[in-house]
Image (tube, helix red, strand yellow):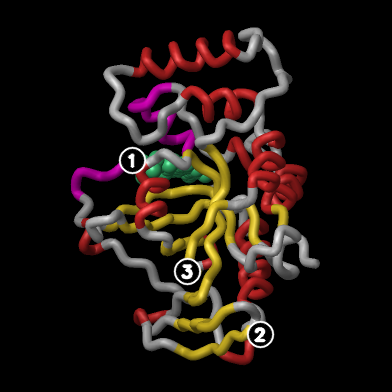
Amino acid sequence: MGCIADVGAFARKRTACRGPRSRNIDQLSCTPPAADSIDAVAQCGIAPPSPLMNIADLRTTYRRATLAESDVASDPFVQFEGWLDQAIASEALEPTAMTLATVDAEGRPSARVVLLKGFDADGPPPDGSARGFVWYTNYDSRKGSDLAANARAALCLFWPELERQVRIEGAVAKASADESDRYFASRPLGSRVGAWASPQSEMIASRDIIEDRERATRSRFEIAADAEQADLPRPPHWGGYRLVPDRIEFWQGRPSRLHDRIVYRGERGRWTTARLAP
Ligand SMILES: Cc1cc2nc3c(=O)[nH]c(=O)nc-3n(C[C@H](O)[C@H](O)[C@H](O)COP(=O)(O)O)c2cc1C
């Protein structure tokens, strides 16, 4: 029986090493005090765009590392774990952020960022599912309805600090209720209330709607406005998804755009690797 790699543990390890800017895995986003202020931009470490900048001239030469067939682990989950560890150690701002691409019933693709919350580094999870990569969301959201219509997806992680990209493709299934319950219970109270309050992806007339719904959720579950702890069940419309990969590509930037790309293809522990042209 394998155990799922606890991405939160990686983040906590990193949090312990960082100063006042440290965040835990559910507080990774930089929240500026005022959306448009230069101070806010500075706090997030983002350079303000110059009016003279021609984006076609923006280029970075990648030369930090190489990736050879002989460098990679035989198991892509082990390979991923090593790269994620290094991304966390590199103090990447959001090392677990990944673009999730889904396709709706009419074949229209859409993509958004979600946070990786676990992956089965050591073997299949105890519930008998195949090994995969897990994130959490609202099952009634746009991505949820895409996945109900078309249960395949792609994930893409980019770690600019390491000049690395990982692309993961495969079939998606809901995580077990137990797994989702455990993760939901580990979230900060505000995030748990938010999961009840937000009809994710629905059009709403104003922000007031969400704030009213947040207050209504607190009142329904008798949670005081200043409470830090409370028991709250997981909403039935909220939980995890596990993508079980049949293809994982590791990309390392190299000079002259002649990058290294190693792809794993296969499933359930039978993987072959190949090099792809950059
Ligand atoms: C850094 C970052 C992390 C995010 N993490 C999540 C997440 O883990 N789960 C989630 O549902 N949405 C997350 N979001 C919000 C999604 O990008 C998206 O707005 C939301 O899930 C609704 O997408 P949909 O309408 O396509 O379903 C995150 C956004 C960012 C920028």
Label 1 with label 3: CB-CB less than 8 Å = no
Residue 48: image location, x then y, percent: 33, 40
Disc 3 vs disc 2: Cβ atoms closer than 8 Å?
no
Question: For mark 3, what is the residue?
Answer: 170
| Position of the N terminus by quadrant | bottom right
Q: Is residue 146 above or below residue 271?
A: above
User: Which residue is located at x 60 percent, y 64 percent?
Assistant: 132
* Quadrant position of the C terminus in the picture: bottom left
Distance from disc 1 to disc 2, alpha carbons, whole Å, reads 43 Å
> How packed is label 1: few (under 14 Cα within 10 Å), some, or many (20 or more)?
few
Using the numbered discs, state the Cα–Cα distance from disc 3 to disc 2 in whole angstroms.
19 Å
Which residue is pictured at 40% across the width and 72% down the height? 61
User: In the image, is 121 to the left or to the right of 144?
Assistant: right
The answer to whether one can see residue 46 in this image is no
Q: Give x and y (percent) for residue 105.
A: 28, 55
Image vertical order of residue 35 relative to residue 80, above or below? above
Q: Earlier in the sequence, mark 1 or mark 2?
A: 1
Q: Position of residue 194 (x, y in %)?
A: 53, 26
Question: Could you say where residue 274 lies in the image, as x and y percent from the top left?
Answer: 49, 90
The part of the image, by quadrant, that contains residue 108 is: bottom left
Instruction: Specify the label residue 113 is tagged with.
Output: none
Residues in magenta?
34-52
Task: Give the distance between the C-alpha atoms of the residues marked 1 and 3, in whole angstroms.
Answer: 38 Å
Tell me what residue is drawn at x 67 percent, y 53 percent: 7
In this rendering, the label closer to the viewer, 1 or 3: 3
Regarding mark 3 in the picture, which secondary structure is present there?
Answer: strand
Which residue type does callout 1 highlight? Pro
The secondary element bearing badge 1 is classed as loop
Residue ID for mark 2:
74
Please give the residue where the numbered disc 1 appears in the rendered image.
48
Q: Is residue 142 magenta?
A: no
